[in-house]
Amino acid sequence: MPARTVRLTGWGRVSPSSAELACPATVAAAAAMLARGTAELSGGGSAARGAAAKAHSGVIPRGLGRSYNNAAQCAGGVVISTAGLNRILDLHPATGLVTCEAGVSLEQLMVAGLPAGWFVPVSPGTRQVTVGGAIAADVHGKNHHVAGSFARHVRSVEIVLPSGETRTVTEQSDPALFWATAGGMGLTGLIVRATVQLKPVATSRVRVDTVRAADIDQTMAVLAEHDRRYGYTVAWSDSLARGGSLGRSVITSGDFAEPGDLSPADAKDPFAFRPGARLGVPPGFPPGLINRYTVALANEAWYRRAHRSRSGEIQAIGMFFHPLDAIRNWNRVYGPGGFRQYQYVVPFGAEAAVRRSFELVSQARAPSFVTVLKRFGAGDEGLLSFPMAGWTLALDFPARTPGLAGLFGSLDRLVVEAGGRVYLAKDSRVPADVLAEMYPRLAEFRKLRAELDPAGILASDLSRRLGL
Ligand SMILES: Cc1cc2nc3c(=O)[nH]c(=O)nc-3n(C[C@H](O)[C@H](O)[C@H](O)COP(=O)(O)OP(=O)(O)OC[C@H]3O[C@@H](n4cnc5c(N)ncnc54)[C@H](O)[C@@H]3O)c2cc1C
């Protein structure tokens, strides 16, 4: 299938770059495409192909483009989209073991699994993420404190290596490659298939308790307590609140409901899941609408509207796990300038750093529309996997916010000093030397990459900036 040159961005719509976009329709075609790119880029073909290779540089996989910046872009090279690799090959109703192509989305897994009582083991804040992208970023969800990140539930991956070889990898057969691929941001090869253990659920609804916390200390105390009581928990915080209200939050926690929790109407279809049509942002939406004044007003309204405390509310999967998915292209509300997300994790014991980060953001009057605080459980073996036991905070800012670069620099220093790190799937600007301080196993990752891909065939705009 011929590739076409396209301009790509991530979800934050900053840092566009152009590449040839290839959309193989089968796993065999995808493998052949990477093998061909490999031969060309390593100069393994004719002299003419070798020369053509110089014009081309690099190949990177792409799923649904939900990483925030340019992890799935490759300026001047080839981007292999897995959009055509979207078949579920086997879903065992008794065990919940699913084998699928890498372009299958988490939403597809929900649609296929829920009627038999199976849900994805880990869900990020959007279900419009592919299985390949979930493994490559080793994504986490509201249940990280009990379930870990996505890779923990992956039983095997089939991966086309930069050498052109297709290999089935499990944690047992090749732990080094498995844990370089989990969180490896597509830089070890093209994942073409995976087998994942789904999670059993008794219904498709969540029984949710909501608590309002007046400040950051209370927020952290409630989150710690809720980690012991609930399978899923997260705080939506007010990033602009100051003084005694610094870090005030609404904390929602829950677990999948039992059939007896459902209303008679819901009980008729306990596994109902209707992703349905979603609203879109109108084309003429004014871009400057997300600013410190509107975000402060929205935060105030949303904090006041939340119940001081409410328990046992039954929510659908979309409302609890993916509220932002209700608006198809909500990233467009930031206008053509786009937006930048900053997500860090710092270890437990660094609560003062969490508090300080809220101070830095509110003092800068930087309007983060989506501000989410959560506690992670232990991290996994992924060399570049983001989660570690501790506090994680995600912030979204319009890219044109004055003083943003200085704020991010201050946050970087705070995070490094606290022994933490930023999330590569969200990052758009961390300097390479700072990243090295954040990821202690980066050298191991680079060494494995050098052995696996000596010609540097796999490359993304992200990997070039950070020398991954
Ligand atoms: C609204 C929203 C909420 C989010 N919430 C969370 C959250 O709660 N937790 C969390 O962890 N993340 C979250 N994310 C980030 C998202 O889960 C990750 O960035 C995920 O990797 C996106 O998957 P994708 O299929 O869109 O991959 P892309 O964005 O297309 O690619 C991401 C990376 O995966 C690689 N990749 C993709 N497919 C393959 C493949 N087949 N083989 C090898 N490498 C591949 C790419 O090269 C790239 O490096 C959120 C994103 C959005 C937009």
Image (tube, rainbow, N blue to C red):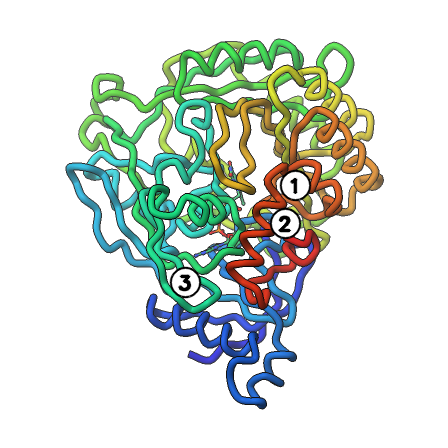
How many C-alpha atoms fall within 10 Å of the one at disc 3: few (<14), some, or many (≥20)?
Answer: many
Q: What residue is rendered at 58% in x and 68% in y?
A: 455
Q: Along the horizontal axis of the image, is 458 left or right of 181? A: right
The type of residue carrying mark 1 is Gln
Note whether ligand 1 is within 8 Å of mark 2. Answer: no
Q: Quadrant of residue 356?
A: top right
Amino acid of disc 2: Gly
Q: Residue at x 64, y 79 (%)?
A: 54
Q: Position of residue 177 (x, y in %)?
A: 44, 49
Across and down, in percent, residue 29 comes to 36, 72
Question: Which residue does the numbered mark 3 point to in the structure image?
Answer: 160
Image quarter of the N terminus:
bottom left
3 and 1 marks in contact (CB < 8 Å): no
Task: State the residue position of label 2.
Answer: 12
Secondary structure under the numbered disc 3 in the rendered image: strand
Q: Which residue is mark 1?
A: 341
First along the sequence among labels 2 and 1: 2
- Tell me if mark 2 has few (under 14), some (14-19) or many (20+) residues whose alpha carbon lies within 10 angstroms of its own: many
| 2 or 3: tag closer to the N-terminus | 2
* Left or right placement of residue 51 versus residue 133 in this view: right
Q: Mark 2 falls on what kind of element?
A: loop
Task: Give the alpha-carbon distance from disc 3 to disc 1, as whole Å.
Answer: 31 Å
State if disc 1 and disc 2 touch (CB < 8 Å): yes
| Of the pair 366 and 439, the residue shown nearer to us | 439
